[in-house]
Each structure stands twice: as structure tokens, then as C-alpha cells.
Amino acid sequence: MAATSTVLVTGGSRGIGRAICLKMAGLGHYILINYKGNQAAAEETLSAVRAAGSDGELLAFDVSNGAEVKQVLGGWIEANPDKPIGILVNNAGIKEDTLMMWMKDEQWENVRRTSLDGFFYVTREVLNGMLLRKAGRIINVVSLSGLKGMAGQTNYSAAKAGVIGATKALAQEIAKRNITVNAVAPGFIQTDMTAELNEKELKAMIPANRFGKPEEVAHAVAFFASPESGYITGTVLSVNGGLYT
Ligand code: NAP
């Protein structure tokens, strides 16, 4: 692994993804900031990446749309042979919580398509170059819900558990090529996704007695991305204040 590389962060416009972009920019990497629709937020991330002393660019595509991933990401890869993607962070995700008995087809599908299908489409697109170069780091942002299951989140828990299974399988497929595949499983982290939750009430069940910060998840991602982590693959690292592992 080279010390610096091009890093693709899906869902890099806000929250945990933005913190990952900034952490990796601080380490000198070139940052490809993917987002779905929030261009203003993505531009803020890019300005912060530049303020951190690095550079990057925006790449808008919907990770759940296979044709769009192929066209936009595949097209970018073809047009930029001088910037091979050495680190991929599959971070884009959504939640649409409700009890299963009331869950609509779209709620099941939207969440699965974003986290699980998105992982598949984006990783497949980036993988070929990593295999040819015999180097790479793939880090998937999953969730505590995918490890323990969470009531009201059968869709989200299933999608994240699916990504954990795929992480372990892909790690075994490509370890010989010097490519690692790992997952980071956050608990409750302060972002737009958790903005409507009552932290005061919920923190009582977290041993650390607080929600985590996006930067604390980014730190774990940077650990897996580092050149020194080459013998660590197929693992899931919890970042949850001791809530559950
Ligand atoms: P967030 O603040 O809601 O941000 C979500 C990000 O994902 C945004 O950048 C959004 O882009 C992007 N995104 C959503 N759907 C997309 C799609 N189809 N294609 C491309 N980008 C898409 O969420 P977050 O809390 O930072 O969560 C980041 C990841 O951590 C997710 O996978 C989430 O499941 C996981 N996670 C979060 C927590 C938590 O407590 N926050 C806990 C465990 C796991 P736009 O800005 O364009 O909408």
C-alpha cells in the first residue's frame, strides 16, 4: 500500500462520511466525495478537505442504482488512470424505521438497496483496479443493528448484517492480492440520522454515557486504511461506547 492514495467515500457529504473525508485528507490522501443529492453539503466537505491541506472532487451518484454507478464511477475511473482508487469506504446509508408488521415494500427495499446493493455495485466497480494493482483497502460502515438486531429496524439490521457477511466472504476471496476488507460498526453517533433521537434518555443505556462523534468512527476507518493494517482482514470493529459487541 502506498502511503497516500485516492480515497472514495460514499455518502461523504454529511455526518460520518464527512468526518472520514476530513480524516483521510489530513493524512494526505486525495478525496473523492460521493453524495446522492445534497450538493451544498458535499461542497462544504470539499472546502474542508482543502482546508485540511489536501484536495479532492465531488462525484454524485446513487449507490443503489447499478447503471448509474457504472456510468458515473466507472466513467471517472476510466478517465483518471493517474488517480487509482486505493481505499474505498462504503459509508452511504439510510434508515426508514418502523415495526415489521407495518413495513411497506418500499421501506424494506430502499434501505436494503442503499446499504447492501450499494456496497455490491460500488465495490465491484472499484475492485478490478485493486486486483490488477494487487493493493487496496475496503472499509464498510455497518452498524450495531447489524450485529445485535434492533426492534423497529428489521430492514436496516438485515441490510447491515448482509454487508457484514459480504465483508467476511470478500476478505477471503482477495486476501492473496493484498487487499483487505473490514467493517466498522458504530453505535449511536451524533449525525443527521440520529438527530431526532433523545440523547439524554438513550445515553443512560450506553456505558460511556454519551453518543459518539463522527470523528471517532473516522479514526477506526483510518486504522483499517493504514498501510500497517495489511494483516487485518474480515473483521468488524465496534465503535459504540461499550453498548454491545
Ligand atoms: P447521514 O448523516 O444521514 O448521511 C448520510 C450520507 O449518505 C449522506 O452523505 C447522503 O448523501 C448519503 N447517501 C444516502 N443515500 C445515498 C445513496 N443512495 N447514494 C449515495 N449517497 C447516499 O448518515 P450518517 O449518520 O453519517 O451515517 C453514515 C453511515 O453510518 C450509514 O451507513 C449509517 O447507516 C451508518 N451508521 C450511522 C449511525 C449513527 O448513529 N449515525 C450508527 C450506525 C451506523 P446526501 O447528503 O446527498 O443525502
Image (cartoon, rainbow, N blue to C red):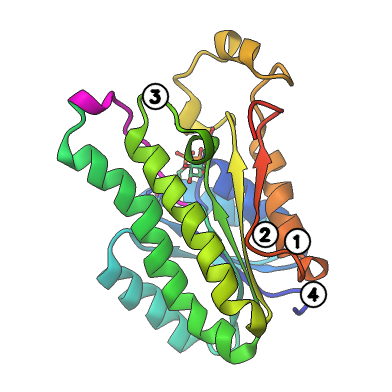
Q: Residue at x 29, y 68 (%)?
A: 66
The picture places residue 129, in percent across and down from the top left corner, at 53, 85
Q: Decide: few, some or many residues near mark 2? Use Cα within 10 Å; few <14, some 14-19, many ≥20.
A: some
Can the viewer see residue 40?
no
Which three-letter amino acid code belongs to the residue tagged 1?
Gly
Q: Earlier in the sequence, mark 4 or mark 3?
A: 4
- Range shown magenta: 92-101
Q: Decide: few, some or many residues near mark 3? Use Cα within 10 Å; few <14, some 14-19, many ≥20.
A: few
Which three-letter amino acid code belongs to the residue tagged 3?
Ala
Q: Earlier in the sequence, mark 2 or mark 3?
A: 2
Q: Nearer the viewer, mark 3 or mark 1?
A: 3
Which three-letter amino acid code belongs to the residue tagged 4?
Ala
Screen quadrant of the C terminus = top right
Residue marked by disc 3: 151
- Relative side of 174 to 221, left or right: left
Q: Is residue 17 above or below residue 79?
A: above
CA–CA distance between discs 4 and 3?
A: 42 Å
Q: Residue at x 60, y 38 (%)?
A: 186
CA–CA distance between discs 2 and 3?
A: 41 Å
The picture places residue 61, in percent across and down from the top left corner, at 36, 63
Q: Residue at x 63, y 55 (%)?
A: 21
Q: Nearer the viewer, residue 234 or 71?
A: 234
Q: Is residue 158 above or below residue 61?
A: above
Helix, strand or loop at label 3? It is loop
Residue marked by disc 2: 50
Helix, strand or loop at label 1? It is loop
Residue marked by disc 4: 3
Q: Is residue 155 above or below residue 75?
A: above
